């Protein structure tokens, strides 16, 4: 039982995990197990995981033909687990290090069920690769929001869509004050995880206070990542650009609509101001879940889906949560010089909706002058309904129905000659990837540079959520798709082979939830896109969002 441990007060719903326990190899990983077991001796949480799949839908939905046991949209079964997995196929020996994936994996408190995918308390998954072996672990991140929710059996902070119920009017007034000071905002770091240039590993969400340092070996929550500067702000992009030499992010200004562009050096906690972009339209800045960079520029998107102060104050979720769609305000793309902080281009572009930018690069003329910036994103047809499609009840009840709105690889071309307009076009025929597109990654060595390949989730219809792993070739304008009926793969994450000269020489890691309720880690060859290995988990895990790679020290 050494590699399969239940924490004392979280009750697994069945004993099947024991039956499914993977075979163990006593190997170089025993030291890891010791560390893990030592940590288990610490205090354990005082709440019980109940089955949320029994809740009745609040809206009438057509009966689904689907008899799937998929667990992607149900809470993680237990607080934590660690063990070595049995590997089918061959993990390349060069793949040495740790893949971490973060996501909102716990969507209920006692009898109370969260409604939106983005509300769940953060679940961190670890895949440690060494000498062809694979150790998996998962663990909840101990944010203040999570600890308070466990202690009080109710939500205590403002999550993506949920707001704590005011006990009475006076406490509500207090709550408003807390909203403006940021005290009532969540620190539930459930969106992504990054490795800073100095080696620290930080879990992130969109609230600045939700930046939490974790130990990539034990998954221990170490503590808050405190920014030591006076730049302020309550929210930032969920996807900073992180390299070995810098951390770049955008801080939206909700009072004087605009964005501050900031940079932090490895080894420091101090963000330094690079420049500011003022919004050109709307009452507030557009949502900046992510943004891209080129070698010399920061691309600042101003999406017509904008933060909304009134919706922030509402106790019940609105159709667009904390946002509002302002087509009359138009959409823009701004280009800032990273070295000087100067705005070098600002263009109106067609309306767009995106969570994730894929990459960007500079287009040059024959004399080497930059004539345009190309920025690619997963674009949801300027249709905000994608946010509603990520409601848990919809995800659970509409599996197998063709309700996923169309998406494409949206390619912006932002001219640098002072023209007022930029263009947005599909980079390849969206039918190549079933008109579904999100959760992208690239070879990190091509960040900000002209690139050819992107990895993402596409669609094999009918479906209600992206269900393929797709390799996009932006030169041939073709896609290769991995698909397993009824399965939901998480973001394909590309790890380049050390010393590789080809852009797609590496592996793609994804975590799959299958229709039998099981789950496994999947490795595809980046070049052929053939499966090279898979390793089954003791039980399926909830869907997760974004990951990072921590190479072996
Ligand atoms: C999981 C994911 O992709 C996004 C999470 C976003 C969150 C938690 C956003 C939280 C927010 C608040 C709690 C109040 C302020 C606005 C906003 C940043 C949307
Ligand atoms: C999972 C997702 C969109 C899927 C739709 O096609 C978006 C996730 C956003 C946050 O990271
Ligand atoms: Fe994201």
Image (cartoon, helix red, strand yellow):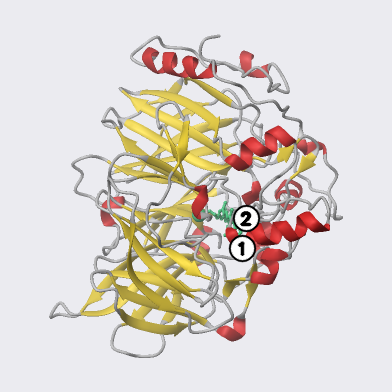
Asked where in the image residue 436 lies, by quadrant, the reply is bottom right
Residue 93 is left or right of residue 323, and the answer is left
Q: Disc 2, ligand 2: is the CB inside 8 Å?
A: no
Q: Residue at x 47, y 40 (%)?
A: 101
Is the C terminus in the top left, top right, bottom left or bottom right quadrant? top left
Asked where in the image residue 404 lies, by quadrant, the reply is bottom right
Q: Residue furthest left?
A: 367
The residue mark sitting in front, 1 or 2, is: 1
Q: Residue furthest bottom?
A: 419
Label 1 packing within 10 angstroms: few (<14), some (14-19), many (20+) = few
* Residue 485 visible in this rendered orientation of the protein: no
Instruction: Determine whether label 1 and label 2 are within 8 Å by CB.
Output: no
> Disc 2 designates what residue?
461
Q: Is 389 in front, or is 189?
A: 189
Q: Is residue 424 above or below residue 113?
A: below
Q: Residue at x 51, y 77 (%)?
A: 257
Q: Disc 1, ligand 1: is the CB inside 8 Å?
A: no
Query: How far is the residue under mark 1 from the one under mark 2?
Result: 44 Å
Q: Is 443 in front, or is 235?
A: 235
The circle drawn on residue 418 is none
In x, y percent, where is residue 55?
83, 41
> Disc 1 designates what residue?
180
Is the N terminus in the top left, top right, bottom left or bottom right quadrant? top right
In x, y percent, where is residue 18?
62, 14
In x, y percent, where is residue 203?
46, 43
Q: Quadrant of ligand 1?
A: bottom right
In x, y percent, where is residue 309?
64, 70
Residue 264 is left or right of residue 479, and the answer is left
Q: Is residue 308 above or below residue 57?
A: below
């Amino acid at each position: 039982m050494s590699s399969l441990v239940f924490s004392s007060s979280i009750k697994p719903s069945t004993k099947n995990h024991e039956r499914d326990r993977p075979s163990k190899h006593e190997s170089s990983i025993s030291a890891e197990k010791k560390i893990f077991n030592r940590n288990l001796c610490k205090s354990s949480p005082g709440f019980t995981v109940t089955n949320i799949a029994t809740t009745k839908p609040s809206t009438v939905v057509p009966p689904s033909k689907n008899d799937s046991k998929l667990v992607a949209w149900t809470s993680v079964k237990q607080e934590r687990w660690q063990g070595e997995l049995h590997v089918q196929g061959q993990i390349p020996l060069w793949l040495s290090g740790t893949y971490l994936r973060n996501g909102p994996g716990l969507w209920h408190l006692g009898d109370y069920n969260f409604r939106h995918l983005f509300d769940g308390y953060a679940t961190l998954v670890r895949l440690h690769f060494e000498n062809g072996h694979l150790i998996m672990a998962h663990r909840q991140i101990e944010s203040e929001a999570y600890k308070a929710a466990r202690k009080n059996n109710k939500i205590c902070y403002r999550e993506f869509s949920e707001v704590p119920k005011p006990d009475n009017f006076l406490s509500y007034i207090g709550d408003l004050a807390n909203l403006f000071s940021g005290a009532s905002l969540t620190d539930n770091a459930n969106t992504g995880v990054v490795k800073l240039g100095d080696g620290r590993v930080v879990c992130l969400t969109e609230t600045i206070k939700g930046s939490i340092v974790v130990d990539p070996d034990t998954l221990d929550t170490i503590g808050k990542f405190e920014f030591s500067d006076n730049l302020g702000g309550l929210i930032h992009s969920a996807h900073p650009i992180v390299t070995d030499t810098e951390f770049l992010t955008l801080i939206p200004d909700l009072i004087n609509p605009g964005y501050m562009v900031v940079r932090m050096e490895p080894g420091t906690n101090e963000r330094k101001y690079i420049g500011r972009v003022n919004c050109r339209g709307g009452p507030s800045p557009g949502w900046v879940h992510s943004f891209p960079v080129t070698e010399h520029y920061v691309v600042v998107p101003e999406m017509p889906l904008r933060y909304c102060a009134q919706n922030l104050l509402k106790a019940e979720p609105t159709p667009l949560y904390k946002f509002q769609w302002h087509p009359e305000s138009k959409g823009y793309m701004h280009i800032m010089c990273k070295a000087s902080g100067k705005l070098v281009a600002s263009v109106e572009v067609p309306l767009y909706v995106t969570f994730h930018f894929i990459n960007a690069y500079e287009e040059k003329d024959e004399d080497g002058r930059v004539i345009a910036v190309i920025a690619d994103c997963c674009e949801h047809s300027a249709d905000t309904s994608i946010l509603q499609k990520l409601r848990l009840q919809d995800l659970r009840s509409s599996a197998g129905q063709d309700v996923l709105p169309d998406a494409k690889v949206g390619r912006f071309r932002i001219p640098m000659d002072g023209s007022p307009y930029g263009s947005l076009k599909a980079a390849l025929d969206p039918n190549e990837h079933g008109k579904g597109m999100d959760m992208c990654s690239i070879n990190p060595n091509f960040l900000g540079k002209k690139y050819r390949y992107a990895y993402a989730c596409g669609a094999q219809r009918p479906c209600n959520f992206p269900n393929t792993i797709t390799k996009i070739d932006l030169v041939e304008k073709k896609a290769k798709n991995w698909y397993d009926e009824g399965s939901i793969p998480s973001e394909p994450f590309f790890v380049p082979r050390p010393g590789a000269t080809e852009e797609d020489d590496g592996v793609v890691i994804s975590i799959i939830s299958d229709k039998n309720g099981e789950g496994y880690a999947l490795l595809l060859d980046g070049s052929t896109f053939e499966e090279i290995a898979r390793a089954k988990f003791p039980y399926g895990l909830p869907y997760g969002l974004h990951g990072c790679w921590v190479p072996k020290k």
